Image (cartoon, rainbow, N blue to C red):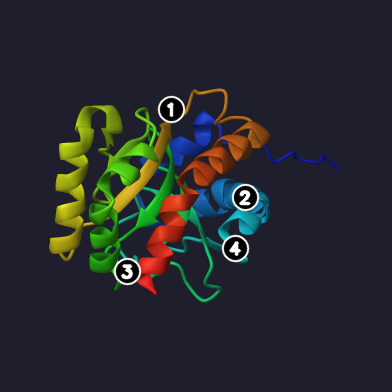
Amino acid sequence: MTTTTITGFSPKDFEVFHIPSLEERMSGIIEHIRPKFQRIGEQLAADISPASGNEMHLHIAKHARRTVNPPNDTWLALCASKRGYKAHPHFQLGLFDDHLFVWLALIYEVPGKRNIATSFLNELDEFAALIPDHYVISTDHMKKVATPVAELGTDGLEAILTRFRDVGKAELLIGQHLKPTDAIVQDDQLLIEFAASTYHQLMPLYKKACLAYS
């Protein structure tokens, strides 16, 4: 019997998102991507739980509500809640067809996002200082586009936080992107180290969000 070693993500994993039908694309995600999410996510959860102050639970996107359109991306989430992650501050690692993302994610389902945004705005300089210039920020988890922090500056960050506070569907995702061809992406241990480093960098913002949320 041949034993298959689960490694990082290969270019073929990203090509899953070019499969046209829902059923076949989901089969590709389940067969090729989810086992890697399980392996990587378990290690990441163990790594960041002590720093977060809580046990972090692994959630893997199921896309269960989709009946026609296949998903354009898929992800794992790490959250202090065992029951679910969308209504809580959480960390993500996932794939679109052209990049891998590593996020601190505050999506529109979080009921306390107005309080979170206000907390960040009240200490805007501290918020900005905690995010390296080469990180990127997105305001919609369903879109690929993200803006480098270096291009935003303090004024741009303030505008994003203000929109996050005032617009119901606005989101805040902070982290890093990697290309499918990056060596880090294709080596699970290097990827785990990269993602964990990103989460530890953003952990003060995660904790602040959790405090404001609660």
Question: Which mark lies nearer to you, 4 or 3?
Answer: 4
Which SS class for mark 2? helix
Q: Which residue is mark 3?
A: 110
User: Of label 1 and label 3, which has the lower sequence position?
Assistant: 3
Question: Which mark lies nearer to you, 2 or 4?
Answer: 4
Q: Which residue is mark 4?
A: 53
Q: Amino acid at mark 3?
A: Val
Q: Are marks 1 and 2 in contact (CB under 8 Å)?
A: no
Q: Position of residue 199 (x, y in %)?
A: 51, 46
Residue, x 29% and y 54% (percent of image)?
Answer: 120
User: Of label 3 and label 2, which has the lower sequence position?
Assistant: 2
Specify whether 157 is left or right of 59: left
Q: Position of residue 192 (x, y in %)?
A: 62, 40
| Cα distance between the residues tagged 2 and 4 | 14 Å
User: Of label 2 and label 4, which has the lower sequence position?
Assistant: 2
Which SS class for mark 1? loop
| Quadrant in which residue 10 is drawn | top right
Q: Is residue 202 visible?
A: yes
Q: Which residue is mark 2?
A: 44
User: Of label 1 and label 2, which has the lower sequence position?
Assistant: 2
Q: Is residue 75 visible?
A: no
Q: Position of residue 1 (x, y in %)?
A: 86, 43
Q: Which residue is mark 1?
A: 179
Residue, x 31% and y 60% (percent of image)?
Answer: 107
